[in-house]
Amino acid sequence: MSLWNTLDQQIHRAAFWATVIALATGVIQFFLPLDVPGGFEATTPERVAWLTANSGLFILGWVNQIAVMIALSGIFAGIAWQIAGTHPLRAILAATLVALASMAFFINKFMAVWTIPRLADAIATKSPASEMAEILLPILNVSFPFSLYTSLDYLGFWLYSLFALLVARPLLSGATAAKVAGAMLGAFGLLFHGLVISIAFGAIANAEIEAYVAGLFIPLFAVMIAALFLFRRASTSSDQVA
């Protein structure tokens, strides 16, 4: 087996299992909280009380989110590899965008796991750092679309959407699974940019942004289903070539 075929096979297998993990952790996320119920309207005292009482579940929810993000980035990296043979420059740019998006997501999700529970604890216990914590906790509010936290989150999704627009067209010339993935990625990229333009022109209220962003996970879920067949088929083909 040549080095190239070995690498190709391993990348496809890794992308296949990344897809499995993304789907599994995505289902798990439905059962884990990411913020106080009614997070957009919740006051800081309500958020502190909830975080103090549910710190373990909150941290577990965001650790699971990190797993979802890593797996989804693995899927996208595998898709970039898929088009590398015919569109090498697009593949390099796409992989770079995935890496940048992953870094943006790592920063804010680590703050959710580490910083936010510590801030809530400092406020609840009236520690010497409580005054600083009372300032920082609203800035890192995970439900406000204009907080520092969600700004990094949406930056990651914007980079994902640029990746999606780069790889969509090359995928459309592939097999059925690739075509489905390409069409759904193209839809995600266009819809996300449409959402950004609508927000910029005031067509969508701040309280509604999260719901619109959540709707964009529908095409991403379709991409994951298509990726199961795409990477499984490609991995099998690599075995046969080897």
Image (tube, rainbow, N blue to C red):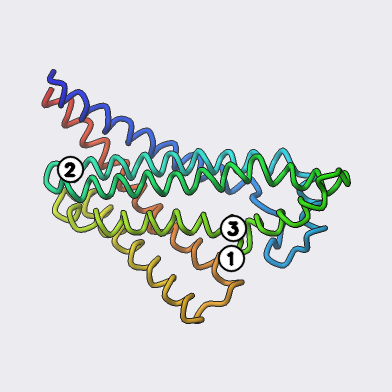
**What percent of the width, then of the height, locates residue 153?**
51, 55
**What percent of the width, then of the height, locates residue 193?**
38, 68
- Amino acid type of the residue that numbered disc 1 sits on in the rendered structure: Phe
Q: Which residue is mark 2?
A: 84
Name the element at disc 3.
helix
Q: Nearer the viewer, mark 2 or mark 3?
A: 3
Name the element at disc 1.
loop
**What percent of the width, then of the height, locates residue 113?**
64, 41
Mark linked to residue 148: 3
Residue 228 vertical placement versus 176 (above, below) = above
Instruction: State the residue at coordinates (49%, 59%).
Output: 154
- Amino acid type of the residue that numbered disc 3 sits on in the rendered structure: Leu
Q: Nearer the viewer, residue 232 or 8?
A: 8
Q: Give the distance between the C-alpha atoms of the residues marked 2 and 3, in whole angstroms.
A: 35 Å
- Amino acid type of the residue that numbered disc 2 sits on in the rendered structure: Ala
Instruction: State the residue at coordinates (32%, 58%).
Output: 162
From the viewer's perspective, tell me whether residue 35 is left or right of residue 80: right
Q: Which residue is mark 1?
A: 146
Q: Quadrant of residue 196?
A: bottom left
Name the element at disc 2.
loop
Q: Give the distance between the C-alpha atoms of the residues marked 2 and 1, in whole angstroms.
A: 36 Å
Residue 142 vertical placement versus 11 (above, below) = below
Q: Nearer the viewer, residue 216 or 228?
A: 216
Instruction: State the residue at coordinates (46%, 44%).
Output: 69
Q: Give the distance between the C-alpha atoms of the residues marked 3 and 1, in whole angstroms.
A: 7 Å
Q: Are marks 2 and 3 in contact (CB under 8 Å)?
A: no
